Amino acid sequence: MKLLDWFDRKTSKWPNLMYILVGCYALGFIVSYVFPMVSLYLYFDLDLILQGQVWRIFSFILIPSDSNVFLAIFTCLIYITISKSLERFIGRGKLNFFLLSGILMQLLGGIVMQFVCGTGMFLTLYYMFSSLFVLFAVIFPDAQFLIFFLIPVKGKYMIILTALIDILDVVKCFAAGADYYGWALVIMIVASILNVLLFMMLNGQASSNVISVRAFANKKKMNNAFNGAPKAGYRHKCTICGRTDVTNPELSFRYCSKCEGNHEYCNDHLYTHMHITGLDAGIDAPQESGIENSVTHEK
């Protein structure tokens, strides 16, 4: 949790990296559509990288996973929407961490793919984007998705459906004799799963501790009402030490989901305070992971 909070503070002014990734995806789609042979200079290949073509370390980001223009546009819109929802819930810094670690995991998968399959040319961001969807479904298990715009399916069941589709793709590759491509899919799928597990481990967030969408909406509504107008020139104040975003702009402030009422804490007291459970300061045992469900208030 400390690593994610440190990264969140240091990168709070960064833009949402999903916009950049989607922009690269769109650019790669257009370039590949106009100049089909250009992908030969973009795919990941460790041997060529060691020969000096270092741009291939990241140029695979430009390789589109869809050849249908309408499907590509729909995919971009879906993942932008998902990223915006996650940004509001976990914060932009943590979202960017997840995306960067996802790219790194795919790069490590590309290296493994090079040794197992003899090439890394199958490496794309498709399964990294899929891991973003899985993270969304874990945090919002009751969110509904419309399959074919008609059939409503909850997020927790979409994870199972997605896993079955991925398994079917792998089985079809091995059944068709394309073992090298089947192993490439396995490597990319495992890399995306590891990315989700890594993020959940660092965030200290088990599925049983995830705030429901309704609870998050209620908490956000109370926070907005509580902070509707700045008091004494500040918007955020730590319940413990009294420091504010004005006196200490380097601090980040978050609300505790386990404290009753609107109690905000700076990052120094976010994990060490005693939970307020009633009108008086009722004490729960102090827990280092007790604020794992805190909700970031957007400035």
Image (cartoon, rainbow, N blue to C red):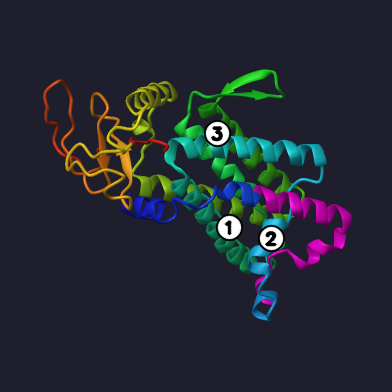
The picture quadrant where one finds residue 181 is bottom right
Q: Would you place residue 35 above or below residue 143 in this image?
A: below
Mark toward the start of the polypeptide (2 vs 3): 2
Which one is in front, 101 or 76? 76
Residue position marked by numbered label 2 in the rendering = 60
Q: Where is residue 232 in the image (x, y as percent from the top left)?
A: 27, 35
Q: What element carries label 2?
A: helix
Callout 3 amino acid: Ile
Q: Give the range drawn in magenta.
A: 22-47
Q: Give the foreground label among 1 and 3.
A: 1
Q: Position of residue 271 (x, y in %)?
A: 23, 44
Callout 2 amino acid: Phe
User: Would residue 177 be visible to someone looking at this image?
Assistant: no
Q: Would you place residue 62 above or below residue 227 in this image?
A: below
Which one is in front, 75 or 167? 75
CA separation in Å, label 1 and label 3: 20 Å
- Give the class, few, some or many, for how many residues have Cα within 10 Å of label 2's Cα (few <14, many ≥20): many
Q: Residue at x 82, y 41 (%)?
A: 68
Callout 1 amino acid: Gln
- Give the class, few, some or many, for how many residues have Cα within 10 Å of label 1's Cα (few <14, many ≥20): many
Residue position marked by numbered label 1 in the rendering = 106
Q: Is the magenta stretch mostly helix, strand or loop?
A: helix
Q: Give the foreground label among 2 and 1.
A: 2
Tell me whether the residue at label 2 lies in contact with that at label 1, contact meaning CB atoms closer than 8 angstroms: yes
Q: Is 225 inside the magenta-drawn segment?
A: no
Question: Position of 190 compared to 10: left or right?
Answer: right
Residue position marked by numbered label 3 in the rendering = 159
Q: Position of residue 289 (x, y in %)?
A: 26, 42
Q: How many labels does the image show?
A: 3
Q: What element carries label 1?
A: helix
